[in-house]
Every structure is written in structure tokens, then in C-alpha cells.
Amino acid sequence: MKETQTIENKATNTQQTERISGSEAIVRCLLAEGVDIIYGYPGGAIMPVYDELYKYQDKIHHVLTRHEQGATHSAQGYARISGKVGVAMATSGPGATNLVTGIADAQIDSTPMVCITGQVASHLLGSDAFQETDIVGISTPVTKWNHQITKASEIPEVMAKAFYIAKSGRPGPVLIDITKDAQFEEFDFVYEKCTGVRSYKPVPETDIKSVEAAAELINNAKKPLVVWGQGVILSEAEEAFKAFIEKAGIPSAWTILGVSAIPTEHPLNVGMLGMHGNYAPNVLTNECDVLIAIGMRFDDRVTGKLDEYAQQAKVIHFEIDPAEVDKNVKTDVAVLGDAKASLEAILPFIHKNTHTEWHQKFKDLYEIEYEKVIKHDLHPTKEGLTMGEVLHQINLESKGEAAIVSDVGQHQMIACRYAKFNQTKSNITSGGLGTMGFGLPAAIGAKMAAPEREVVSISGDGGYQMTIQELGTIFQQKTAVKIVVLNNDFLGMVRQWQQLFFDKRYASTEMTNPDFVAIAKGYYINARRVTKREELAEAVAEMMASKEAYFLEVCVEKEGNVFPMVPSGASVSDIRLS
Amino acid sequence: MEKELKQFTVSVYTENNIGLLNRISAIFQRRHINIESINSSVSEIESVSRWTIVVNLSEEQMKKIIGQIEKQVEVIKAYYHTEEEIIYQESCIFKMKSDLLFDERQIQNIIKDSNARIVTVNRQFFVIEKSGRKEEIELLHRELSVFGIMQFTRSGRISVSKEEMKISKMLAAFNH
């Protein structure tokens, strides 16, 4: 941190320059941006930068992942739990292309990330040189911004811009591709932080008229419903959000990226929206009179059939990205701007209310869901372990203090539905892209960014094997993540769809799995397998008590299904309980 | 797709940056929208580029796409207009056999009536240039095609809006 300040002082106060190489400049830029950890994988075209990282290893910790995809997901996990920019680094060609999945994931889930790739020397560009690939072209549609550097002198300005763009406004991934000759080239280095780009307006101005119009609709509403998303977390609007819903007394439901913004136990929390969300908020979306969307984008997994989504309601949309307004759901009042600022602005206009009768409807529907679904998930009496009871045990041990990092599939829906959270930024999952393999490496990044916190990675047997090699990273870095695999020997979510919509034709969803415990032990990670209900509580307790990484495989029922479910293309109010 | 398609002319003011063509065309490509014509040039403001893109869309789709274009970091501002809201020109070039000038005398009248211009003539061929509205160019093409056209090419549309597009003001605001 001290080093960072000296560099900044040099840059901003005296404008002194220093003659250094492009690759050293890259590392100095990272330091100036407060980067302490980067995730990456070396290779030919990025070697000069790695040589500098070697020299600066007491200031920047480089984590060697076992695959570049793992580096991006670790950087994402780091960013999601800390709110800081995650950094991933790779060489040209395959190193760069291996980043693409993580970049696309960060783009759709608005995660601030800067990826740095090496590139062949500028005189070789376009010559099909060894490990040359057009990563700027490839990454264009999945980055917020990208740029290729061919001259060392461009480095400070472009790097400063990269961090500014990644973090500001609606965050997203930025890729900077640097040719090898630019890394070697010496130039006069001076660093200035970026404070603005003239063609880019990160936060639109909030129109006070829209705030007043929204307040009027909210004050006159008889059956208002708040649906919130990650925007609340990204703008650190948690307190403003809580103050707003508490004053207005509005039942509030979340998207899977929005959960943990307020504690799970908050009385106004009415649960999860969407395909596998809770019964009450889905059904009552089609009964509310004013729908107040805050920092969410009406993803199709949330809305179901759009023509039958909240047609009866007036819609208010608090949103930072103007392109999201009216994209999927037509709004009556759009409040553009940063969620925190907008919510603080609206609070004085809001009348106190309780909406007691309206709340009762949510409670009544919850009771139905509890009897038909939740009870059987969390407290099963039949043979065969459920994913839900594993989550229940984790909750009992974590008391809501753990960060839960899930992968993609049935276990993810169960984890999001049942995990309890007391702290914000605690549910880390791949929402928009649905990237299997996200969980394990993301958990590594989360644990490194918040070593004081308990981080539990929950995966299925399918997704786990997509990035299982990151156990090597965990072993080498001594990262104390807790790894849970809910093993049903199936690609469970696809199997569920095959059962429900394809007459049980289980095409390529059954998995013959290896000995996961032996694999974890191969990486010298403590490991245990649970097959019986009697062992579960004790095994989870042992895992949570461990000071080191710990692997727990739970063999759950093979053909368990996740309910409730809004079938694809159906209306949210046609949600099925079985 | 049930919505009525209209022709829109999109004007985009951008920073002059490598790769922006890719970024903007990808917005259309991703939504399976065909670009009728695209033109990039300098604008009235130094170091600011201006794109003119012609597409057929519903107005609702058009609005969403403008949002997606403006979202790009290096885009300063994007507008869409109907044909009534702009003054536009397209230009085209015909290459034809020189014999025709003597054998088919009405060609000279066609050129004169259409306000086209002969750019060059040599023994083998002559070249006609015509700027105008889309229909005028189509008419000239129809009239000349009966004589046989050796080569034909048409440019993308360029246009100015009747209403002011307040780019200079926006850029000035940033500098303060």
C-alpha cells in the first residue's frame, strides 16, 4: 500500500518520469490501482511481465491457477466478495482464448475485472505467428471495453482507463492485449489515475421528477412488490435499500445475484424470484399493483413469459444502465441513476406504511410452499439425502456468516433458495451465463479476498469436474476453502428437464464418477464422503471446524428434482410445486 | 417480428478507434439484423468520427439498439431518424462501354436528365457518377442496365439531420 501511494504521489504531484520497460510499467500500474492479488498463467508472449512480477512478488501476489478459465473465475470471486476489480493474466493464443468464458460471465453478471493478455510482437500481428490469436476481435462482444497496446508509452493511460471503466457505472470486464515488443520497450513512465472518459457516462443523472413520480405511485399502492437485484450490492445501497423498504413496508423479493443485500431473516424478505424461486413472490408478481424493480434487469429466468408478467401492475425501474429500461418489461416510471443515490433521494418522499393484509398473502403462500416443498427438502423423512438438508446443515454451522459460492445446476438453485446470509456480497454464483465450473475457482478468489470469512464452495458432480484441477491451486496456495460436492451421478438439472419434458430420455446426463475423495486426497486436501443421513451433521461440522481446505462429498438422491418450477415459456404465476 | 418494419438512418458519433466497427456491427449481427448500408467518416468535430447506418427495423427494436450502441464506451451519442427527418445522399458509379456513347445516343439524355456526370472517357469505357436519393439512383440503374453495365457500385448513405444534434455541447460539458 505504501508503494502504491509513493507512485501515485510521484505521478500526481511532481509529474516526474522514470525510464522503465513496458512490462515493469504494467506492474507499476497494477500497484497504483491498489491490486494485491492477480490470477494467471504464464506463457511466451507474457513472459516479460512475469519477469517483473517475480521482482515485485512481495507487493503483488500472483496466483498460478491450473487453467486460464480458473484465473478469470478466481478474479470474479475476488471481485464479487470485495467489490474491487479482479485481475486475470494470460499469454497469447490459447491462454487468451481460455479467458473468454470467464469474461463473458463477468460481462453478463456485471463483474469488474481487468484481463491482461500477452500478444505476439507487433511486427508479427496478422502473420499467423505461433500462439497468435485475435483476442481483441474475439473478446469484443463480451467485454465492456478492450484495447490492444503496441507501444509501451500507451500503457499508463490505457491501464488507468481499463480500471476506471471496469469499476465505474455498471461494472464489467475489460481486456488489455499487449504485444511482446511493447512489454520490452523502455519509455518515460508516469501514472495518472483516470477520472473520466469523454464518450462514456458511467452514471446517468437522476431526474428528480422521476423520483417524485415513483414516490407517488409507491405511496398510492395497495399491493406493492419490490424486486431487487445485484445493483443494490454493486452500488453499496444496502442501507438505503433497507431504509426504503422498511419505511414503505413493502414485501421484497430478490434475484439470485441480489440475495444477501439484506439479511435472509429480514421480515420484509419474501424470497427468491424466477424459475426455481419461491411460490409467493412469483405468484404475487401477477397480483401486485406496483412493481418496483431495483438494480435488476428482468432476465427471462426471472420473468417467465413476458406477455403474462405483471401486466396488471405499474412498473417502476431503478436502473443505472439506460439500455435496460424498457428492454424486457415496459416501465411506467424509470428512475435512472445509481441505486444508492436514487434510493436516498426517494426516501423523504415515501410515506410510512405496513401493508399488513398484503403481507399476509405472502405468508399464506409460503405455508403452502413449506408444506409441499420446503419441509421435504430441509427435513426429509424418506430414504436418500436431499441437497436441501445439506444446505440446512451448513446454515446451522455457519449461522449465516459464510459466503456461499455455487456452481450451476440443481445444487445452485437449492443453495440460492436455502442458504442463509447475514452479510452482503455473500452469494457468489454464475447467474446470467450459467457457467458450469465457475464455483471452485470463484471460491478460491473469494477466500483470498476475504480470508477472515468462511467460504463454502458448493458444486454438483458435473460442474465440479469442469474445473477440478483448481484443487491444485488450493493445495499450492493453502487456501482454506470448504468444498462441498452434492453428487447425484447425474447432470441433475438437465436430467430433471429430460424427466419432465423429454419423457425421461436421459440422453448423456448420467455420469460415471471417479473417487472424488481420493482425488482431493491426491492434492493433500482433507476429504470425506457422506452417504447416510446419520453422518451428515457431524461431517458438516467437521468440515466447518477445519482450519484448512476441506472436501466433503455428499451422495444425494439420484433423481431429486428442484421445485417450485416455472416451466420454460410459462407465466410466473403458473409456477409448479411438484 | 410482428411489428411493422421501417427504414431508419442511424447517426453515431464516436471516438476514432480501431475495433469500433466490430463492436457496433456486432450489436446488429447478434440480433440477426441486416445492415443495409454503413458509412464511417470524419465529422464536423475534430477527432470525432461519424457513422451513418441504414437498417430496417421496428421502432421498438430501433430504440433498444440505440441504447446498446450508446452503451459502448467509445460512442459519444447515437440518434435514429426516419427519412423525413434527414437530408441524405447516396452516390454510385457506372462503368460502361464507350461505343454506347455513339451507338445509343439516348444515353447522353439519360445522363443529362438524371443530373449524373461523366467522370472519365477513354477508348474502351466511360464512367458515370451520380449522387442523390435512393430512388433516383435506382431509376438511373434501371435505365442504364438495358444497355449493359460493365461495373456498378453504390456507396453507403450519408446524411445530416434537420434537427440539431448537440454533440459539441456534450463534449464541451465534459471538458468543464
Image: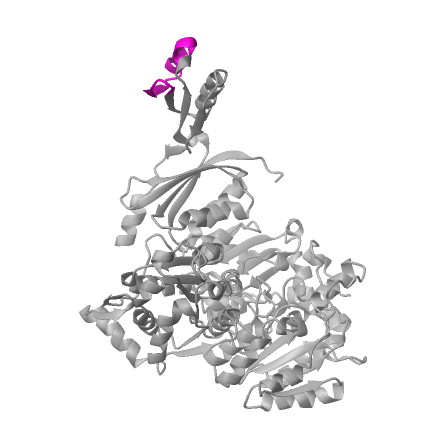
Specify whether B51 is left or right of A222: left
Q: Measured along the vertical axis of the image, is residue B1 above or below residue A36?
A: above
Q: Magenta span has A182?
A: no
- Identify the residue shown where x is 55% and y is 59%: A293
Q: Which residues are magenta?
A: B101-125
Residue A479 in sight here: no
Q: Quadrant of residue A531?
A: bottom right
How many marks do you count on the picture? 0
Specify whether B52 is left or right of A260: left
Which quarter of the rendering shows the N terminus of chain A? bottom left
Specify whether A58 is left or right of A20: right
Residue B100 drawn at (x, y percent): 42, 13
Q: Quadrant of residue A7?
A: bottom left
Residue A363 drawn at (x, y percent): 69, 69
- Identify the residue shown where x is 63% and y is 67%: A272
Which quarter of the rendering shows the C terminus of chain A? bottom right
Residue B73 drawn at (x, y percent): 39, 54
Q: Measured along the vertical axis of the image, is residue A573 above or below residue B81?
A: below
Q: Magenta span has B104?
A: yes
Residue A559 drawn at (x, y percent): 77, 71
Which of B28 and A122 lies nearest the eye of the viewer?
A: A122
Residue B146 in sight here: yes
Q: Quadrant of residue A63?
A: bottom left
